[in-house]
Image (spheres, rainbow, N blue to C red):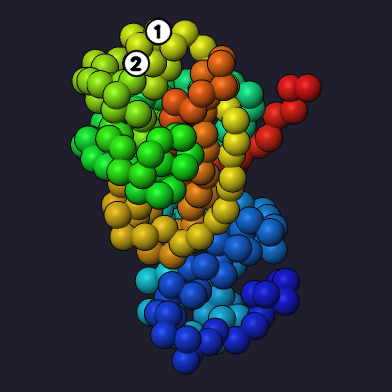
Amino acid sequence: MAATMKRPIDRRSGVALWRQVADRIRLGIAGGSLGADGRLPPEIALAQTFGVNRHTLRTAIASLVDEGVLRAEQGRGTFVESRRRIAYPIAARTRFSTGLRGQAESHTSRLIAHAEEPADSIVSEHLALRLGGAVVRLETVSEADGRPVARATAYFDAARFAGFADAYAETLSITAALARFSVADYLRRSTVVSARHADAQELTDLRLAPGAIVLFAEAVNVDLEGHPIQYSRTRFAADRVELTVVDQN
């Protein structure tokens, strides 16, 4: 196994041992040092590798089974879930439904919360609004083939897009909702991507196990005149989605 797999677990880090083991297994699968043949080594071998007891190892494996990374078959062993990650393109025109085309049999989005509120300094800067200006905030979850893949928070200028939450609730599409406000087309101006552990709310909304990684994308969309119309913060389940930058020049 790779050197990262053989490093001793840090028992003084304050992070639960099972979570550290789950992270190591996840990294090992992603890097190809674990489960390259589709199957994990026996429990005894893994427990020895990580220097933990079998109860701790089983807790880690159970969390990854719940997350959909692994599949346990009684009497046969533990297998790497074979469903491939969705390649989600970041392009000049980034659309959820278009990005999933040919990769998922079904896809849907749902509105889980919305509000009109004053813009903080970050939102006002990205939308070119005065500090405290009214914005519409949407909280959404998007799924592909029944699995949550993205949890998004999106902001829109409330003066220009009054009633946007209702339009989205009816269409379940940002693009279709914008069309109702005479925005027939729009472009991606910027996207900044980072990675981190999912927080408690993201674990619930994306149906992930503790220790799961999310890709965090901040993006700004503009209309064809270059005016900002949407600022969003989207968390993608890293074990289900990979972000790809598409050069359209």
Mark 1 and mark 2: Cα distance apart in space = 9 Å
**Crowd around label 2: few <14 · some 14–19 · many ≥20 (10 Å):** many
The residue sitting at 56% across, 70% down in the picture is: 24
Quadrant for residue 29, please give it: bottom right
The residue sitting at 43% across, 48% down in the picture is: 122
Single out the mark in the foreground, 1 or 2. 1
| Screen quadrant of the N terminus | bottom right
- Going by the numbered disc 2, the residue's amino acid type is Ala
What percent of the width, then of the height, locates residue 212? Answer: 45, 59
Which residue is under mark 1? 182
Query: First in sequence: mark 1 or mark 2?
Result: 2
Quadrant for residue 179, please give it: top left
Q: Secondary structure at mark 2?
A: helix
**Crowd around label 1: few <14 · some 14–19 · many ≥20 (10 Å):** few
* Viewer-proximal residue among 108 and 114: 114
* Viewer-proximal residue among 188 and 248: 188
Extreme-front residue of the structure? 130
- The tag on residue 177 is 2
Quadrant for residue 157, please give it: top left
Residue 79 visible in rendering: no
| Screen quadrant of the C terminus | top right
* Viewer-proximal residue among 110 and 35: 110
Question: Would residue 109 be found to the left or right of residue 185 on screen?
Answer: left
The residue sitting at 61% across, 52% down in the picture is: 38
What percent of the width, then of the height, locates residue 154? Answer: 37, 36
What percent of the width, then of the height, locates residue 193? Answer: 58, 47
What percent of the width, then of the height, locates residue 99? Answer: 55, 24
- Going by the numbered disc 1, the residue's amino acid type is Ser
